[in-house]
Image (cartoon, rainbow, N blue to C red):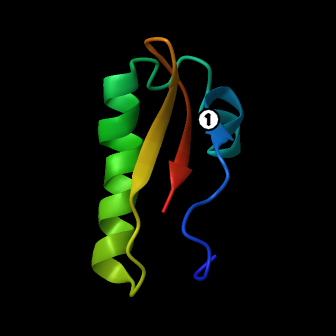
């Protein structure tokens, strides 16, 4: 993935399942981003030579997925 600018879009529910999160864990998007995504991105950026960021994808007002760069 180093030569590719961005990952494919991970659909939210499938992504939550891949992370091993239960249906009721971090239901609020603010909690999910703060306690899961932002924390993971911060740790990756601090402890590796890889710089990661994410972009959220929406359908209307609802977040439907994420992609990483």
Q: Residue at x 54, y 17 (%)?
A: 24
- The percent coordinates of residue 52 (x first, y second) are 41, 66
Q: Residue at x 46, y 18 (%)?
A: 27
Q: Relative to 27, does residue 36 appear above or below in the rendering?
A: below
Q: Nearer the viewer, residue 16 or 64?
A: 64
Q: Residue at x 48, y 63 (%)?
A: 69
Q: Relative to 16, does residue 55 appear above or below in the rendering?
A: below
The residue beneath circle 1 is: 16
Characterize the local packing of mark 1: few (<14), some (14-19) or many (20 or more) Cα atoms within 10 angstroms. Answer: some
Q: Residue at x 70, y 44 (%)?
A: 18
Q: Relative to 61, does residue 37 appear above or below in the rendering?
A: below
Q: Relative to 28, does residue 34 appear above or below in the rendering?
A: below
> SS at mark 1?
helix
Q: Nearer the viewer, residue 63 or 4?
A: 4
- The percent coordinates of residue 65 (x first, y second) are 57, 34
Q: Nearer the viewer, residue 68 or 47?
A: 68
- The percent coordinates of residue 8 (x first, y second) are 67, 52
- Number of callouts in the render? 1
Quadrant of the rendering where the N terminus is positioned: bottom right
User: Quick one: which residue is furthest to the bottom in this view?
Assistant: 49
Taking the image as shown, residue 52 lies to the left or right of residue 3, namely left
- The percent coordinates of residue 14 (x first, y second) are 71, 34
**Which of the 4 image quarters holds residue 47?**
bottom left
């Amino acid at each position: 993935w180093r030569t590719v600018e961005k990952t494919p879009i991970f659909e939210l529910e499938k992504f939550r399942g891949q992370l091993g999160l239960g249906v009721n864990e971090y239901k609020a998007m603010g909690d999910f981003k703060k306690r899961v995504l932002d924390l993971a991105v911060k740790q990756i950026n601090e402890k590796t030579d890889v710089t990661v960021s994410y972009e959220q994808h929406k359908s209307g007002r609802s977040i439907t997925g994420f992609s990483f760069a």
